Image (spheres, rainbow, N blue to C red):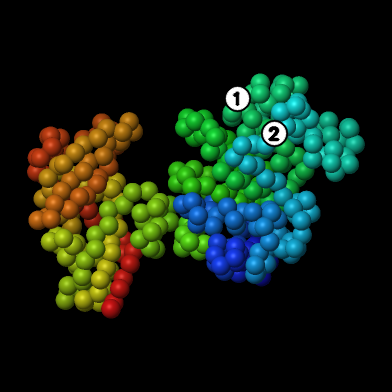
Amino acid sequence: MTGSSALRLDRVRKDFGPVTAVQEMTLDIAPGQLVALLGPSGCGKTTTLRMVAGFETPSAGRIVIGDRDVTDLPPHRRNLGMVFQNYSLFPHRTVAENIAFGLRMAGRSRAEQRDAVARMLDLVQLGDRGDMYPRQLSGGQQQRIALARSLVLDPRVLLLDEPLGALDKALRESMQFEIRAMQQRLGITTLLVTHDQEEAMTMADQIAVMQSGRVLQIGAPAAVYNRPESRFVAEFLGTSNIFDGRVRPSGQEIEADGVTIRLPRAASPGAQVSVSVRPERIVIGEAAHALPNRMRARLADRVFRGTHETFRFEIGPAARQVHAHRQAGTGPAGVAGRPQEDCWIGWDTADSVIVTVNDR
């Protein structure tokens, strides 16, 4: 076991009858880190969180918090804080009473409860809301109170289960930064479950991308996004252009739908390879002509998305689609922007990532 881990899952598995929801997961979270479990519905991320919380018992493996094996301990003996998507605040209790609830159950004195509640209200910047009821607060304020209630007992680990799913887009984005700043200020180890890619990349120190009960890749958000290790990660985390083809005798390129794609590294001649290229890495217009991977393309569509524009091109004899992104207002030279016009597109070889190789 790694001595520096604040939370460790050691070969944890969870079976529901004949179905294995989590498969031999090993995960180390360092003290003070925020790690996001990211994946589609049914990938096992929520089951993993419930096992850490003590709501589900692993079929195999161990869960260790600090140096303490908590695998068989009930939830109330694990010293965890947890925030749910629906906040689960008591509607008939005031904000202060909601925050103090765990302290009262732990037998703390009224003076201790009063001081701790005041400290938490200041922390979440709601010091004047203690006498109000949850129904009188906005969604973002209720979310902060749920956080305060979870943090008031000074937990070793904080668990966040889709905590922002009930908020609208603007408030959700604002709360991502607020929660992240609070987590860093407190230095509390945190495990976040989300299916929202932007939320994971904004808040997490490390992202663990899950599929079918397995962690496919874990790393810093920029590393996982820019260097995906599988086709699933490339397509799930953001948008990606995937080119499939067989490696030519030179070992340096593939042919995909009649288009030649240069590889970032040599591969075995004859191998079937998939290459990922992010849309924002694709250069449009005259500047693309000098790049290693360049081709003529026909503009099929151009969509304004506020912060950026999305271009959809067709390339090669099969009219294979390629997507490119550009920051709004920075239109590329050499593109009039009307559908069915031809132009150059291209990208640097270093911006290609090999995500699958099949030598058979």
In this rendering, would 252 be left or right of 258? right
Does dot 1 land on a helix, a strand or a loop?
A: loop
Q: CA distance from mark 1 to mark 2?
A: 13 Å
* The quarter of the displayed image where residue 342 is located: top left
> Where in the figure is residue 34, as x and y percent of width and height?
58, 50
Residue 132 pos. (x, y %): 72, 21
Residue pointed to by mark 2 = 89
- Closer to the chain start, of discs 1 and 2, is 2
What label does residue 345 carry, if any? none
- Mark 1 closeness class: few <14, some 14–19, many ≥20 residues within 10 Å: few
Q: Callout 2, which amino acid?
A: Leu
The residue labelled by disc 1 is 138
At x 43%, y 56%, the residue is 224
Q: Residue furthest front?
A: 17
Left or right of 353 on screen, residue 258 = left
Q: Quadrant of the N terminus?
A: bottom right
User: Which element type, helix, strand or loop, lies under badge 2?
Assistant: loop
**Residue 358, above or below 219:** below
Instruction: State if disc 2 and disc 1 touch (CB < 8 Å).
Output: no
* Residue at 61%, 37% in the rendered image: 86
The one nearer the camera, 186 or 153, is: 153
> Which residue occupies the foreground of this view, 296 or 50?
50
Q: Check the image and report above or below for 177 versus 69.
A: above
Q: Amino acid at mark 1?
A: Ser
Residue 295 placed where, x, y %?
13, 53
Regarding residue 195, the answer to whether it shows in the image is yes
Residue 276 location, x and y as percent? 30, 58
Image point 18% across, 57% down: which residue? 293
